[in-house]
């Protein structure tokens, strides 16, 4: 039976010390290579899990930071669209001003230019999209930006409609002695005009009967030549008259928000220069689809169109101010989030990162200790070898 090797106490102590030193050297070299003082839960459970909590929160806010940054770009795109539309509206306003003194082909060309620029507003707003979000082409669009995991910590930015229809910029229609210009419809819906406004209908066919029907409210009067017809509520009043070619039928609105119905027995009634083919013509109010009916030399009609454009500019400025405030808020949240993420990451680093200078000094000291341990082990072995001198 082989006997076990017996080590002296001195040798055993030297071996244990050398083993501990080697373990410390491995740990120190690991810290120097990774830069971490706490790389796993076994190194320091408390510091490790505290640092992990901070790192996870920093990661979550880092994702929100990217969303905020994209939100800023989306709103800035919308602001750029508003600025461009404002420039177009100013151009249209300049064209409208030129209509006051224009005549003939120049007047017609300016009308065309007015409508062409108006169309570009709609085209531009449709193109003002960022990653599928368009904040200037529909009031139903909304940009939602989340700032954290909390549901309430968010910002919802409502879209606006700055298209030509959203801004209520009607197209320009060349007119002659009339406020209307419609074609190919069986019913006309016109916005209520002020009391005293006159609607003129010129019939250019053979004899036809014009019957004034019922109304929804009392007040309006239909005048034909010397004939006046007071329309009663619910059709209780009314009258009829036969028109010859070239005759004029005038409808004078005495009050607001009234509806007059004119039934024609023939098919053709002319409004201005365009034909309305119908068997029933309903007049609700005074202007159709917000169009600007402008006759040569009629500065009042031009001024009405310019007022419409001024209102559009006011709306654009208001929208720009609102979106600009949202950009400022998003930028503030972005700056805060960046700083907060840095603070969280810094806190996690303080719990886990190693001091490279300190660990370098520790490694040098441990290497010296290791060399001394090896020397001590050698000395202990030499002391035991002294017994061999007895056998010489």
Image (cartoon, grey):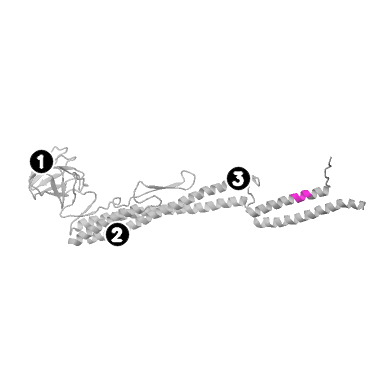
- Element type where label 1 sits in the image: strand
Q: Residue at x 73, y 56 (%)?
A: 367
Which secondary structure dominates the residues rendered in magenta? helix
Q: Position of residue 130 (x, y in %)?
A: 40, 52
Q: How far apart are the two marked residues, 3 and 2, measured between alpha carbons?
A: 62 Å
Indicate the quadrant containing the N terminus: top left, top right, bottom left or bottom right.
top right
Return the residue nearer the eye: 165 or 234.
Answer: 165
Farthest residue to the front: give it: 1
Q: Is residue 360 above or below residue 3?
A: below
Residues under numbered marks 1 and 3 in contact, where contact means CB atoms less than 8 Å apart? no
Say left or right for 5 vs 264.
right
Q: Position of residue 284 (x, y in %)?
A: 20, 44
Dot 2, crowdedness within 10 Å: few (<14), some or many (≥20)?
A: some
* Mark 1 or mark 3, whichever is nearer to me: 3
Q: Is residue 17 magenta?
A: yes
* Mark 3 or mark 2, whichever is nearer to me: 3
Q: Which residue is mark 1?
A: 239
Return the residue nearer the eye: 258 or 205.
Answer: 205
Return the residue nearer the eye: 170 or 7.
Answer: 7
- Element type where label 3 sits in the image: helix
Of pointers 3 and 2, the one earlier in the residue sequence: 3
Q: Is residue 260 magenta?
A: no
Q: Which residue is mark 3?
A: 49
Q: Residue at x 50, y 51 (%)?
A: 337
| Badge number at residue 90 | 2
Q: Residue at x 11, y 46 (%)?
A: 223
Dot 1, crowdedness within 10 Å: few (<14), some or many (≥20)?
A: some
Magenta part of the chain: 15-19
Say left or right for 219 vs 123.
left
- Element type where label 2 sits in the image: helix
Q: How far apart are the two marked residues, 1 and 3, measured between alpha carbons?
A: 92 Å
């Amino acid at each position: 039976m082989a006997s076990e090797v017996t080590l002296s106490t001195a040798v055993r102590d030297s071996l244990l010390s050398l083993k501990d030193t080697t373990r410390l050297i491995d740990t120190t070299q690991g810290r120097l290579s990774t830069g971490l003082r706490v790389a796993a839960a076994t190194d320091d459970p408390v510091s490790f899990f505290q640092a992990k909590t901070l790192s996870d929160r920093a990661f979550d806010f880092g994702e929100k930071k990217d969303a905020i940054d994209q939100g800023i770009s989306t709103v800035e795109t919308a602001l750029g669209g508003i600025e461009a539309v404002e420039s177009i509206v100013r151009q249209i306003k300049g064209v409208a001003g030129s209509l006051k003194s224009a005549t003939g082909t120049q007047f017609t060309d300016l009308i065309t230019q007015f409508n062409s620029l108006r169309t570009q507003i709609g085209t531009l707003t449709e193109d003002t999209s960022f990653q599928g979000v368009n904040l200037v082409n529909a009031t139903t669009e909304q940009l939602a930006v989340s700032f954290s995991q909390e549901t309430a910590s968010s910002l919802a930015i409502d879209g606006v409609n700055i298209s030509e229809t959203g801004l209520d910029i009607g197209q320009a229609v060349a007119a002659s002695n009339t406020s209307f210009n419609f074609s190919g419809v069986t019913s006309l819906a016109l916005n209520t005009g002020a009391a005293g406004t006159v609607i003129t209908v010129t019939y250019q066919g053979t004899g036809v009967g014009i019957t004034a029907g019922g109304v929804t409210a009392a007040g309006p009067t239909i005048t034909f030549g010397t004939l006046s017809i007071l329309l009663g509520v619910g059709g209780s009043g009314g009258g009829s008259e036969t028109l010859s070619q070239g005759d004029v039928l005038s409808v004078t609105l005495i009050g607001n928000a009234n509806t007059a119905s004119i039934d024609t027995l023939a098919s053709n009634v002319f409004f201005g220069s365009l034909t309305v083919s119908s068997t029933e013509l309903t007049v609700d109010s005074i202007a159709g689809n917000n169009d600007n009916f402008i006759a040569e030399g009629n500065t009042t009609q031009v001024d009405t169109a310019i007022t419409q454009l001024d209102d559009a500019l006011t709306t654009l400025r208001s929208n720009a101010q609102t979106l600009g405030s949202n950009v400022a808020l998003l930028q503030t949240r972005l700056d805060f989030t960046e700083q907060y993420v840095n603070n969280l990451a810094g806190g996690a680093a303080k719990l886990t990162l190693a001091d490279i200078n300190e660990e370098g000094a520790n490694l040098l000291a441990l290497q010296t200790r290791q060399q001394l341990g090896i020397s001590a082990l050698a000395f202990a072995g030499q002391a035991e070898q002294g017994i061999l001198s007895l056998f010489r």
